[in-house]
Amino acid sequence: MITILPYNGRWPQEFNQIQAALAAALGPLALRIDHIGSTSVPGLGAKDVIDVQVTVAALSEDVRQALLAAGFQQFREAVSDHVPPGEDPAPEKWQKFLFIQPEGQRRANIHVRVAGQPNQRYPLLFRDYLRAHPRSAQVVEIIKRQLAKHHGDDVAAYYDIKDPVYDLIWDAAQTWATCTGWTA
């Protein structure tokens, strides 16, 4: 069941704990570790799941094994991201590893993506755009609450609607990035 909660001021600290565990597990394999998703935007209501992006040079077996050894659990069926309309659909641009937290720890989604690929840039730009545009973040929350209200028990339907809505924000965020000189 998808439930959208009010923003929780503890989410950044919870991310810091997850980040420390990932940094210890991955060492130099992690080029950067970022808090992404709705829980990374102050004031934005979200599902109570911390989304994290680990940026790596390659989706290598070393990365996968380091995370497994640290107790993170891999979702092998989630191997790529949604491709926004108009983007290059080449599979290598949208590949990822998806892990969740070790057993008994804070609920988290760990997205491992390759540096410089559009799917690595997307969540960072999305986050920064919503941080800079709190009214847009409010609208995102309204949309998510309505989706959860009407499709909270149907995850596929929730994302079938949410992804195209987020694609609208992706277009606006890219224009904003160009105008402001934003870089990841």
Image: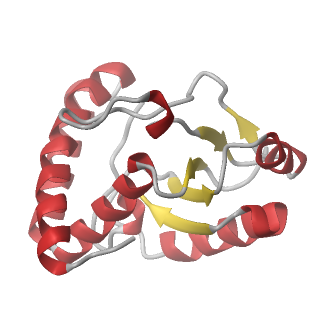
Viewer-side residue, 80 vs 151: 80
Find residue 121 and report its image quarter. bottom left
> In this rendering, does residue 21 appear at all?
no
Viewer-side residue, 21 vs 33: 33
Q: How is the image coloured?
A: secondary structure
Find residue 157 and report its image quarter. top left
> On the rendered image, what quadrant is the C terminus found in?
bottom left
- 116 relative position to 118: left or right: right
* Outermost residue to the right: 69
Q: Position of residue 27 (x, y in %)?
A: 81, 68
Q: Who's the residue at 20% across and 29% down the image?
A: 161
Q: Is residue 48 above or below residue 40?
A: above
Q: Position of residue 84 (x, y in %)?
A: 25, 36
Q: Is residue 131 above or below residue 113?
A: below
Q: Position of residue 68 (x, y in %)?
A: 83, 43
- 156 relative position to 149: left or right: right
Q: Who's the residue at 33% across and 69% down the image?
A: 41
Viewer-side residue, 94 vs 65: 94
> On the rendered image, what quadrant is the N terminus found in?
top left
- 101 relative position to 161: left or right: right
> In this rendering, does residue 24 appear at all?
yes
Find residue 45 and report its image quarter. bottom left
Q: Is residue 119 above or below residue 95?
A: below
- 46 relative position to 110: left or right: left
Viewer-side residue, 30 vs 93: 93
Q: Is residue 136 above or below residue 89?
A: below
Q: Position of residue 127 (x, y in %)?
A: 32, 64
Q: Who's the residue at 19% across and 32% down the image?
A: 85
